[in-house]
Structures are given as C-alpha cells and as structure tokens.
C-alpha cells in the first residue's frame, strides 16, 4: 500500500470521523507496465465521535529476472484520537518478504486540524532484515538494521473547491550503504515500482492539488524520492479521479507515470472503491 493511499485514507477517515459514528471500507487493485500488480483492503471504524481505528492489508506480486515471482505482504493498524483541534495517531505495520527483505514498523503522528488547513508531524521506526541471496561472486548473508524517519504533511483549502497537499519525510539508517557495491543486489529487486528495494528510501517529498467538481474530485500529484541503497532518483506523476457510484459508495481511478533511475520508465493504473457506512 503506497504512501499516497495511506494519506488519502487518513484524510477521508478524518472527514467520516467528524461526521459521527460510522464505518469505512475500501478495496482496490493497482498494476504497472513492468508486470507488477497489487491488491489492497482498507477499513476504519469510528468508536466514538473522537476515536477512530483503521487498518490496511495489501499484497503485491512482481516478476523477477532470477526468481519467478516475488510476493510482498503489507499490513498496518492505527489508532487515532482527536482532542479537537489537535489529534494523535499511533500504529504498527509489517511490510515485505521474510525470505528477502522485510520490516517491522512503528509510527506516530501529532496533527492539528482546522477548518481550512491540516498540519501533521510524523515519526517512524523501521526494523529491517535484508537477506542478500547467494550469487556466483557472493556467498550470501542476512543484514539486520533499522531506520528512524521524521516527516510532515500539510493540507490547505485554498478555496471551497481547491486544496493543496504537501508531504515529506527523511530517514536515518543505522548502516551505511555503499551504492557502487550494491548494483548486483539492486538488480535482483528493482524491476517495478512495487519492488522490495523501493521501500529503502533516503528521503521523499510530494505535492498534490485537489479540485472538487460537485461530488467529484480530481487529484494531481508529483512526488520525488531517492533510494538509500543506490541513491537512484524516482519521480512520479499521478492523476486520480474520484466519483460517487451510490449514496454510500465512491470509485476512484488513477493513472500515473514513474521516471526512475532504478527500474526505468513505468506506467501504472489503479481502481479503488470506498464504502461509507455512516449513521
């Protein structure tokens, strides 16, 4: 489940939470031109008018040159409490494949939500196990390391119809990566935007513009990140369109393009459906 999906889910969840007791469920698929595909389930429950529990589950599949298929699991759960206008969120997540690269994550956020703006600061702790496979020139080994991430998100309602979203995060790793020595390792994993190695980023930043047209919404996003292992840069451009299907159901279509020094040029497409069960 990508960062954008988490951000959008928390924004929508916050709006549903403000409306009162309710439930929200989302599901969708994403595929790319490098034969990567993923499926996601999202859910949230409003316990009280100020307490929200949310979670997500995603699984992706990528074809690798030296291994038939790589399957990656992502799972997260979060607890959100709004003091109004200040709120806190804390949670845990798992991401990866235990035979190659996986991570146990803990994260927390402090945010302020006003009528026209939302500001949030984040902290994330990631504990990795990286299994470097055996090759003709390398016997293979397992490396355990960790990373601390500090970030921020902001959303501003410029007008009643237009909003601006900013996000950024930087990570500090407990090991020093040497890009020139890791090229063979990177080639095992970097074939798609869903590849495992793309979870190891040094920093990322993004900007998004949202435009409401009645009950419909357009999102235009540009994001950039730099890999921690090989210092490769990836720039992503995405357009998404959200529209109602029924009184309680929305559908979202997404189309995007990645320009990556690690895995080349990739086009991706996504479809998500959201159900809102608000009393």
Image (cartoon, rainbow, N blue to C red):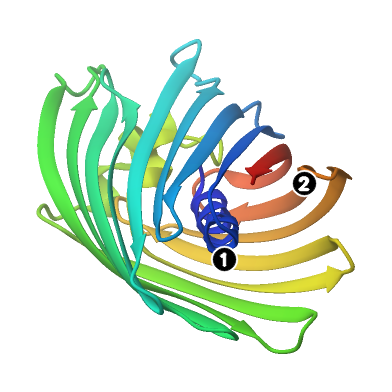
Q: Which residue is mark 2?
A: 252
Q: What is the x, y in percent for residue 10?
A: 50, 56
Horizontal side of 176 relative to 66 (left or right) equals left
Instruction: Give the side of residue 161 with respect to residue 119, left or right.
Output: right
Q: Is residue 159 above or below residue 217?
A: below
**For the view shown, which residue lies furthest in the front direction?**
279
Which residue lies under the disc numbered 1?
A: 223
Which residue sits at x=81%, y=63%? 217
- Within-10-Å neighbours for mark 2: few <14, some 14–19, many 20+: some
Using the image, tell me which numbered label, if any, was put on residue 231: none
Q: Is residue 66 above or below residue 84?
A: above
Name which residue lies at 69% across and 41% down: 274
Q: Neighbour class for label 1 at 10 Å: few (<14), some, many (≥20)?
A: some
Residue furthest to the top: 68
Instruction: Determine the residue positioned at 11% across, 43% down.
Output: 145
- Kindly give the residue lying farthest to the bottom in the view shown: 158
Provide residue 92's location: percent of width, then percent of height.
26, 42
Residue 98 image offset from top left, x and y in percent: 26, 21
Q: Is residue 233 or residue 168 the one in the foreground?
A: 168
Q: Nearer the viewer, residue 56 or 201?
A: 56
Q: Secondary structure at mark 2?
A: strand
**Which residue is at 36% across, 68% downward?**
169
Q: Position of residue 28 (x, y in %)?
A: 67, 33
């Amino acid at each position: 489940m990508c960062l954008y999906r988490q951000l959008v889910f928390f924004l929508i969840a916050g709006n549903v939470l403000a409306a009162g007791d309710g439930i929200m469920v989302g599901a969708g698929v994403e595929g790319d031109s490098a034969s990567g595909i993923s499926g996601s389930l999202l859910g949230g429950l409003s316990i009280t008018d100020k307490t929200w529990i949310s979670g997500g589950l995603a699984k992706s599949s990528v074809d690798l040159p030296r291994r038939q298929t790589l399957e990656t699991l992502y799972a997260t759960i979060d607890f959100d409490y709004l003091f109004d206008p200040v709120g806190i969120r804390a949670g845990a997540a798992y991401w990866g494949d235990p035979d190659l690269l996986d991570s146990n994550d803990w994260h927390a956020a402090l945010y302020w939500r006003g009528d026209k703006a939302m500001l949030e600061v984040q902290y994330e702790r990631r504990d990795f196990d990286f299994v470097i496979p055996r090759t003709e020139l390398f016997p293979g080994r397992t490396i355990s390391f960790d990373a601390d991430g500090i970030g921020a998100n902001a959303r501003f309602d410029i007008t009643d119809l237009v909003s601006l979203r900013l996000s950024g995060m930087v990570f500090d790793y407990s090991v020093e990566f040497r890009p020139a020595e890791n090229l063979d390792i990177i080639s095992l994993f970097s074939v798609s935007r869903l590849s495992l190695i793309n979870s190891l980023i040094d920093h990322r930043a993004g900007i998004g513009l949202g435009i409401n047209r009645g009950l419909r919404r357009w999102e235009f996003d540009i994001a950039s990140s730099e890999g921690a292992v090989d210092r490769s840069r990836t720039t992503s451009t995405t357009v998404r369109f959200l529209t109602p299907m029924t009184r309680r159901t929305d559908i979202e279509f997404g189309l995007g393009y990645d320009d990556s020094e690690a895995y080349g040029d990739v086009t991706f497409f996504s479809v998500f459906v959201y159900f809102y069960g608000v009393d």
